[in-house]
Each structure stands twice: as structure tokens, then as C-alpha cells.
Amino acid sequence: MTTLTADALAAGLLSTGAVKLQPGDPFTWSSGLKAPIYCDNRQLLGLPELRARIADALAEAAKAHHPSLIAGTSTAGIPWGALVAERLNLPFAYVRPEPKKHGMGRQVEGPSAKNHRVVLIEDLLSTGGSSLKCVKAVREEGGVVATVLALFSYGLDAATEAFAAADLKPQVLCTFEDLSAVAQAEGHLDGAGRASLFAWQMDPQAWSKERGGA
């Protein structure tokens, strides 16, 4: 199976509709923010060939960090994390953003993270908040988080700052810059649309307010 490049993944994200770009007719996120981009990487799970190539790429990237445990973030990171763990023949756990409210009250489900070197798998990085809640849970249980590994990132300053504060550098298979370049090359965006996409990335709140969002 051929290596999955960032451009190939970007093309796959766009062709499958996992990422949709509408700078002229923005989406409204659950927060109320208007945005020119919407990402639903769960769409990729229904495509066996692309899914396998992504899982292979994630596993190769994770392997370089010499993990002893793979963990997936709940819920979207769980299937990707499980596929990676299977490929690397490693134990798998998943991490909730908050402790369970009943039963054992666990936040890390499955094997304990204690004394493990963990690669945490995400599908998407936005502000980094939910990922870092999971990082904190793994660390509190006694695990070392080697990296957070995701399919795609919006590349927002808020995430960069949050991960820096947590002394952690995330890794992604496809960046916002990769995606926008492929989108323009394939005709999903014109120059003005791409410029609007980067204006949003620079200041999502201002971009949203200009268009009547939160």
C-alpha cells in the first residue's frame, strides 16, 4: 500500500465530504460561531481503502514515538486509536473528556495508563481543549503522553498556545495549509475563498461577528 501523503489525505477529505468549505455561505458551529469550514472525519470510516491508508499512516507516525499504549479520545478518536493499536500490536484505552459520573468514575477506560508511554489519537484538532483534558487525565493516572496525533487540524493559534502551555507538541497528518492548497488546486476554492479561509483561521471570532455569528 502506498504511503499516504498530506496532499492525498487532503484530497480524500474533500472528495468524501469529510471536510466541507463554504466561505460564501458559512456554517454555524454549536458554539454559535460562523465558520467557512466544517469537518466530520467520521465519514472516512465508511471507506475501507482510504480508512486503511489513514490507519497505516497514523500507526507509522505513532510508532516513531515508541509508545507502550495507544489511547483514543472519546468519541471520534476511538476507532482510529483502535486501528492503530491493532497495527502496532499494543494495548488500547480510550479517554473521556470528563470522568464518568457513575460506576467506577473512570476517565481512562481500559488498561490503566500508569507507567505507560502513550500516543493519544484524535480525529481533529480545533482549539485543543478537549484533547488536553484527555492528556491531563492520562498524566494524572501516571502515564507519559508522547504526543497527540490527529488526522487534521484547523491550525488555530488557540490550539498552538494551549499545547505549548501543556508542554506538548501535537502532530497531524494533514494541516490547514495542506488542505487549502489542495482545495484551490482542485477547484473547491478560488483565490478569494482561500483568502477568506485564512482570515477566519487568523481570527475566528472577528470573522464570525462580521457575518452575524457569535
Image (tube, grey):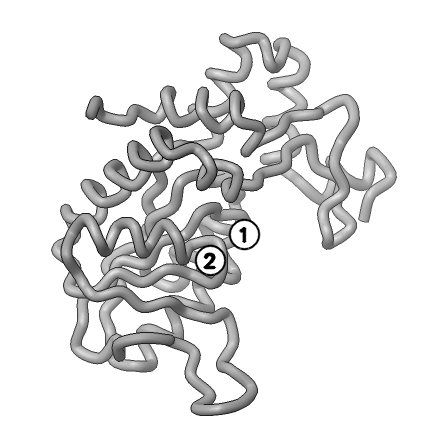
Vertical side of 64 occupied by 25: above or below: above
Which residue bears the numbered disc 2? 162
Give the alpha-carbon distance from disc 2 to disc 1, as whole Å: 8 Å
Q: Residue at x 33, y 54 (%)?
A: 81
- From the viewer's side, name the closer residue of 144 and 196: 144
Question: Crowding near pointer 1: few (<14 within 10 Å), some, many (20+)?
Answer: some
Residue 127's label in the rendered image is 1
Q: Residue at x 37, y 21 (%)?
A: 8
Vertical side of 50 occupied by 154: above or below: below
**Residue 137 pos. (x, y %):** 39, 75
Question: Crowding near pointer 2: few (<14 within 10 Å), some, many (20+)?
Answer: some
Judge left or right: residue 136 versus residue 141.
right
**Residue 139 pos. (x, y %):** 31, 75
Vertical side of 176 occupied by 59: above or below: below
Q: Looking at this rendering, what residue extends furthest in the right direction?
A: 212
**Residue 25 pos. (x, y %):** 79, 26
Q: Residue at x 62, y 29 (%)?
A: 20
Which badge, 2 or 1, comes first in the chain's sequence? Answer: 1
| SS state under label 1 | loop
Please state, as top left, top right, bottom left or bottom right, where the N terminus lies in the image. top left
Hey, what amino acid is under mark 2?
Ala
| SS state under label 2 | helix
Q: Are marks 2 and 1 in contact (CB under 8 Å)?
A: yes
How many dots with numbers? 2
Vertical side of 178 occupied by 133: above or below: below
- From the viewer's side, name the closer residue of 39 and 125: 39
Judge left or right: residue 6 versus residue 125.
left
Hey, what amino acid is under mark 1?
Thr
- From the viewer's side, name the closer residue of 68 and 191: 68
Q: Residue at x 45, y 20 (%)?
A: 11
